[in-house]
Amino acid sequence: MSSQQVLSSREREVLYSIVETYIATGEPVASRTISRRRQETLSPASIRNVMADLFEDGYLAQPHTSAGRIPTEKAFRLYVQSLTAGRKAVLDLKQLRTDLNEAESLAGCVECSSHALTEVTRNFGIAAAIPTSSQTLDRVELLKLVDRRVLMIVVTRDRMVRERVVSLQEDIGQDDLTCLRNYLNRNFGGWVLSEARLELRRRLSDESAAYDAILKRLTVLYGKGLLDVDWAPEISMEGASNLVGLDLYLTRERMRELFQTLEEKKRMLQLLDRFLEQPGGELAVQVGLGEEHPAMRVLSLIGLKVVMPGGLSAKIAVLGPIRMDYERVMSAVWQVGNAFQEAIG
């Protein structure tokens, strides 16, 4: 069988049976095992011939001379193409939507999503929300603290909450802060944040601002970064311990390197950016992550990029062993991603 030849339906069926058996058992698969799994009559000898062709074409490997065959990354990639995301009902969507809607902030929604992925897949769940300057302002809160300090809170329509404590040279009472808050919410609620900040700067630069008590005080807070929020992503990762019990065939040093990588949020965001390049709403599956780090060659990433109209983008993903239940994990990622979009969008 040439490496360029398309597999026949029989070859695909045998290969998929081998993949599914290997996922279930973790052991090399023998021809007799596949013969018993198939409903149609096909002798072990015939299956051995098919397996020999698959082996020659790089879909199967043989760990030992007398052992059965195990699927390669090439086999897993072909197998994944045959699956449909979302087909399996793997979690309680009603409860997930309730949990997401009850979350008080974007950070809470991100944490809820990664937890749901970890619970249902028993792998490493990742959820990240990446804000942009095109987010829409919901409201501003200004609270007086001791020692001439003020807590500035900016909330966007996608429930992102950013807090900043600033110190002032002159004290501003809570009544005045309430007036400033009302002015901001009345004039800029519903604006894109970047546009609101530009318009506020224009108003403050007008000559009349020097004679307006509210604008004079706003000038002070503007200089302290009012509406200039931190665009750091929200990211939640959970379930690294689930990988401990798996036989990933890694040395102790490689395992240590793997866990160090999983603990670095910046590294994980780079991983998501690199492998989740599909347009929003399209599920991506990357079998084998050796390009990212040698210790991750035995892992696969299944993820989904979600883009909301308010300027927020999110990435929902699961990291697990190459030998994982792809159909279940793909469905979980798809369902959590869509529930996240419904709750935030």
Image: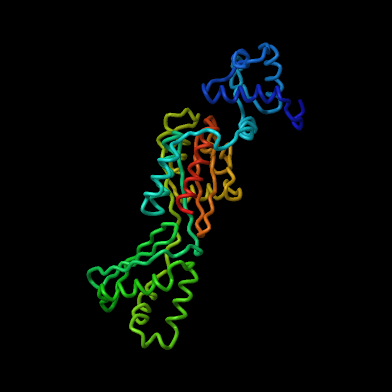
Residue at screen point 65% across, 21% down: 14
Above-or-below relation of 51 to 147: above
Residue at screen point 63% across, 34% down: 77
| Count of numbered marks | 0
Q: Does residue 204 appear left or right of residue 147 in this picture?
A: right
Q: How is the image coloured?
A: rainbow
Where does the image place residue 299, in percent across and percent down from the top left? 53, 36
Q: Does residue 1 appear left or right of residue 338 in this picture?
A: right
Above-or-below relation of 50 to 207: above
Where does the image place residue 321, in percent across and percent down from the top left? 51, 33
Q: Does residue 238 appear left or right of residue 271 in this picture?
A: left
* Image quadrant occupied by the N terminus: top right
**Viewer-closest of 334 and 236:** 334
Where does the image place residue 50, in percent across and percent down from the top left? 70, 19
**Residue 253 position by quadrant:** top left
Residue at screen point 28% across, 76% down: 176
**Residue 20 position by quadrant:** top right
Residue at screen point 74% across, 30% down: 6
**Residue 245 position by quadrant:** top left
Q: Does residue 300 appear left or right of residue 141 in this picture?
A: right
Where does the image place residue 307, in percent across and percent down from the top left? 54, 53
**Viewer-closest of 110 and 183:** 183
Above-or-below relation of 217 to 86: below
Above-or-below relation of 219 to 156: below
